[in-house]
Image: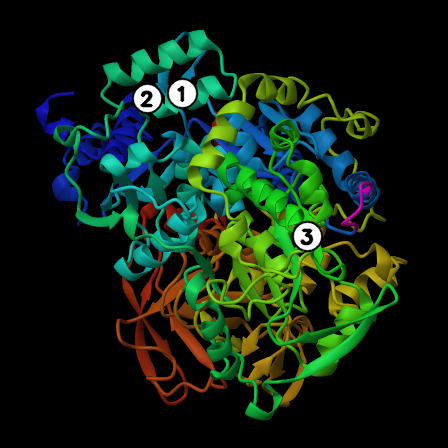
Amino acid sequence: MNASKDRLPFSIRVLLESCVRNCDEFVVKRSDVEKVIDWKHTQYDSIEIPFKPSRVILQDFTGVPSVVDFAAMRDAVKQLGGNPELVNPLCPTDLVIDHSVQVDFSRTAESLQKNEELEFERNKERFQFLKWGAKALRNMMIVPPGSGIVHQVNLEYLARVVFKNENYLLYPDSLVGADSHTTMINGLGIVGWGVGGIEAEAVMLGQAVSMVLPEVVGYKLFGKLHSMVTSTDVVLTITKHLRQVGVVGKFVEFFGPGVSELSIADRATIANMCPEYGATIGFFPVDDISLLYLRQTGRDEVNIKYIEAYLRAVKLFRNYKDSSEDPDFTQVVELDLSSVKPSTSGPKRPQDRVLVSEMKSDFLSCLQNKVGFKGFGIKPEKLETRVPFTFDGREYVLSHGSVVIAAITSCTNTSNPSVMLGAGLLAKKAIEKGLSVSPYIKTSMSPGSGVVTYYLNESGVTPYLEKLGFDIVGYGCMTCIGNSGPLPETVVEAIEKGDLVAVGILSGNRNFEGRVHPNTRANYLASPLLVVAYAIAGTVVIDFEKEPLGTDPNGQPVFLSDIWPSREEIRNVEQQCVIPAMFGEVYSKIQYGNKRWNSIPASNSLLYPWDENSTYIKRPPFFENMSRELPKHRPIENARVLLYLGDSVTTDHISPAGSIARNSPAAKYLMDRGVAPKDFNSYGARRGNDAVMTRGTFANIRLVNKFLGKAAPKTIYIPTGEEMSVFDAAMRYRQIGTPLIVLAGKDYGSGSSRDWAAKGPYLLGIKAVIAESFERIHRSNLIGMSIIPLQFLPGENAESLGLTGKELYTIELTDDIVPRQRCLVKTQSKCFEVIVRFDTEVELQYYRNGGILQYMLRRMLADDAN
């Protein structure tokens, strides 16, 4: 690189290398290379560039529908006269099965075995299908269930850092993943981010990611963390800070001497939470600590040497203590690590940080505040409600703030030995002081890889965690994604009887309403150490500085400070107990070490043999009646509003992953096919069946539809004024040929990169969404399903325009549309402009083809014909 390129942010250098290496004057042009080189000036111009990632990573909730789509595409290619063998991933793809296991059993030594047995029993059809995919589709590796969480497995095992192809060409590892927390890998200096499952499929088929050249916010870290502070506290602080700064759609690149104080696990924790602070990536360039991590995790020494040599040669290697290496940034913000204090986040959003010292007062305020992100609207006379109940023959009492779920879970924290060992040391000291956890609290530990088990055992803390109820219940996402399993019936009855705001405390990355468990209205993200602490306390209505956790055998009060291990104490144990041999032992058998997986039979056929009776895997209707020619788009005239929504509607609200309610349209569909309620499984596990998923669209019990003014998975069928399920209303509209739209507020589609949050609305008949703003991945997914994302003009929204949502809407979209142009929306009494959020020409092509997969199919058929 010459001097001008030396000032580019390191993350932009990765984009530049990709453009240079793939420049063919067709997909990637010389002009694209020049745009990236001139980033300092072009970053403000919404310039589109292509980016070809080195690989794709999937988890099974997003992976199953992707493989279903590949199977259906093979059928469609054959039907259109093409060769179905053409349909294969062209980009190396790894799929890790981590979302299927649930916490059905906990607090026993048999929990792990029983949960895994149930996982295989429930998901046999899904797993058979994925084994077909592993055999039939070239260039795809499937990591069996029980191996760990996709992002931790990626960090510890799959990550290359530098790719070496068959011709010994070296180039940076980079990836996209069909999961928003793919960003975790940026902690190891690998550029990667989450995309919609639909967009991931296009990349798998060799398509470049079309992206707007981003601004890059430099985040300078300096100072040192206090002894009582964890990496979780750091990330919750950064998340709140960057939400305030505003980094949506931007890259964040960390620099400064403080980065050298952070381990790769600490950096990965910060990078993992990138979707929560809204950026595309949170990047830490490779340095000496990165190489040390590769050695610690058992990577090949020869590979590590060429990784270092290559990255130094192309100036992608970083010395954080040398400020002369600092690149130019769009904007610089700073954090003094010494200012970080112990924190949690909640009760309903990950960006709402709460200092532990203020937790009690903050929660009590939330109880009384009006219903919202920081409020539950509990009436004054109900604040002191206490409900007695019996569990295992003993009487207990629940009140507002009682902890009923305490889960050490999620790749965000279980990938970090410092906080996991910290939790173990805290548990040891708690047991030695005579403390315990009430038996009705659902405690669990679900590590992101088997390595965690090794070092917890090696350090000797496992028995103490188990005595407090934190037995290992499985290796997967579990509580973090809502697979928290059932609570004891008497606990549920007490919560419902008192209309209590019960609490889930988890070391996860998301705590949106209705996600963790239907009966925990308040959910707080916290470090594993604080998860254990609040489980012991049994409530969040406690001031740890002034109130004891309990008493020792002599009746003396025990405070949290009495059992809290210091960073130095944790570091010493980590250095002794986390060794490379553990990683080698665990990952040497990752593909073939699961006997249950190995025993599952699978078809060897080129085309998937669909079973018409299956309630898990069903051929999707996306390619029905597809032709080789472009479809004609009908104007959207006299559309009805299916839902009128507010701010921060998440993909969990749109397409929940959790349990299937027994009174829901999805439940009726399953029961009509002979599936008993106990075998419903979850929406996430049913993503291979469009009939279930369409009925589950907008089925979250916490969905607030302004037509109703209350939380419920329902809407109003406007022609008659009837209240009914969203699915039933959509089908009524379909019968009379009425197109549908959704009205929404800010940050529509935030949360997980869930493709069914776009596929479901498409199958309901939704043609457009008009919102104040869109989350990046969800906007991409909508376009991938040919749903038009329309954005209100700045300062405008449905309320300011006087819309009731009960009008008829006509959207005047012409055939000569260009990216980000404005168009008119007309109702009977109003006419207003919106921005059409097709941001690139490629996105317009997806829309014109009726979706991204249809676009890829037509290209494939055209290439084959030539």
Q: Mark 3 and mark 1: span between their CA atoms?
A: 39 Å
Q: Position of residue 493 (x, y in %)?
A: 78, 75
Mark number, residue 400? none
For the residue carrying disc 2, how many other residues have a C-alpha within 10 Å: few (<14), some (14-19), or many (20+)? few
Q: Which residue is mark 2?
A: 288
Q: Nearer the viewer, residue 780 or 60?
A: 60
The stretch in magenta equals: 105-110
Q: Position of residue 506 (x, y in %)?
A: 58, 54
Specify which label sits upstream in the sequence, 3 or 1: 1
Q: Secondary structure at mark 1?
A: helix
Residue 44 seen in render: yes
Mark 3 vs mark 1: in front: 3
- Left or right of residue 786, residue 799 in this image: left
Q: Pick the residue in front: 200 or 812.
A: 200
Give how far apart the Cα atoms at labels 2 and 3 are: 43 Å
Relative to 409, residue 302 above or below: above
Asked if residue 579 is among those painted magenta in the image, a careful observer would answer no
- Mark 3 residue type: Gly
Residue tagged by mark 1? 292
Numbered disc 2: secondary structure: helix
> Label 3, on which residue?
434
Query: Chief secondary structure of the magenta span?
Result: loop
Of tags 2 and 3, the one toward the viewer is 3
